């Protein structure tokens, strides 16, 4: 997995960093905010058969707290928000079922040029791998200054392979784009595999030649006679 560039800024060394790497099965998101920005964010995620509460990231206080509930078959696919006045002033969570937000909404309707979205076309739960971000550190609290995503690249690489009307191409090698099912003949090409994040050349099953089968049986017969 790897980090995508976040919404917001990570230039300030005094910011408090938070990280939920690997916590992908999110069930609830608690967002606390004021008119000026997001004060805190907290997650409840599913891990080893139970719901686990994350640390509360940010500060206490705030005017509004909203609970976002994700369905059992719902997962995050994208983030969007507005970064202004050195912190995030609007935030929306996008899922495979729709969107939740925006939260805070300050400047969301006035500064379209400041709106940023992280969307790499996630289409499977296994591609989303958690969130990370930062809060500004001030004497009387601070605001969310950045938020980003972790994603897994294995499935994405397969989906991003250039396609033609004939199928997918891997290093100029033609690969049959047929649906894998039990009726597909064994002589057809298999779907390409991915090893260490890189597509490898597909393996084509072949039937052994008659000569090879006869020699194999002959060698077995000789070995049997030797062992008598």
Image (tube, helix red, strand yellow):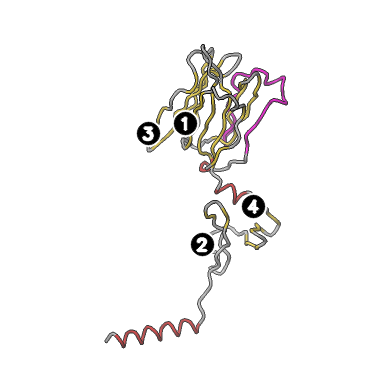
Residue 177 against residue 85 in the figure, above or below: below
Callout 4: SS: loop
- Going from N to C along the chain, the mark reached first, 1 or 2, is 1
Estimate the spatial distance between the alpha carbons at disc 3 and disc 2, rounded to whole Å: 37 Å
Residue 99, quarter of the rendered image = top right
Pointer 1 local density, CA inside 10 Å: few below 14, some 14–19, many at least 20: many
Residue 80 against residue 216 in the figure, above or below: above
Q: Which residue is mark 2?
A: 182
49 and 156: which one is in front?
Answer: 156
Q: Is residue 110 magenta?
A: yes
Q: Which residue is mark 3?
A: 50
- Going from N to C along the chain, the mark reached first, 2 or 4, is 4
Quadrant housing the C terminus: bottom left
Q: Which mark is residue 27?
A: 1
Question: Magenta residues?
Answer: 94-119
Horizontally, is 52 left or right of 133 in the view?
A: left
Residue at 70% of width from left, 56% of height from top?
164
Callout 2: SS: loop
Callout 3: SS: strand
The image shows residue 101 at horizontal and vertical percentages of 59, 24
Query: Looking at the image, which residue sits at the far front?
Result: 13
Residue 45, quarter of the rendered image = top left
Pointer 3 local density, CA inside 10 Å: few below 14, some 14–19, many at least 20: few
Q: Which residue is mark 4?
A: 161
């Amino acid at each position: 997995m790897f980090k995508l560039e976040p919404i917001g800024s990570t230039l300030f060394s005094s910011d408090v960093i938070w990280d939920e790497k690997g916590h992908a099965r999110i069930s609830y998101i608690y967002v606390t905010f004021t008119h000026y920005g997001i004060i805190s964010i907290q997650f409840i995620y599913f891990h080893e058969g139970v719901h686990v509460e994350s640390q509360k990231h940010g500060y206490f206080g705030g005017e509004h707290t909203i609970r976002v509930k994700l369905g059992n078959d719902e997962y995050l696919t994208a983030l969007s928000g507005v970064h202004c006045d050195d912190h995030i002033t609007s935030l929306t969570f996008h899922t495979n079922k729709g969107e939740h937000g925006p939260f805070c909404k300050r400047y969301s309707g006035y500064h379209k040029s400041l709106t940023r979205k992280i969307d790499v076309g996630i289409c499977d739960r296994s591609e989303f791998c958690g969130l990370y971000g930062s809060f500004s550190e001030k004497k009387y609290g601070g605001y969310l200054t950045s938020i980003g995503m972790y994603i897994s690249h294995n499935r994405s690489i397969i989906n991003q392979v250039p396609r033609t009307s004939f199928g997918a191409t891997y290093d100029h090698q033609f690969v049959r784009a047929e649906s894998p099912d039990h009726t597909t003949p064994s002589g057809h090409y298999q779907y390409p595999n991915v090893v260490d994040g890189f597509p490898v050349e597909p393996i084509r099953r072949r039937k052994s030649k008659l000569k090879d089968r006869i020699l194999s049986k002959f060698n077995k017969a000789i070995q049997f006679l030797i062992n008598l």
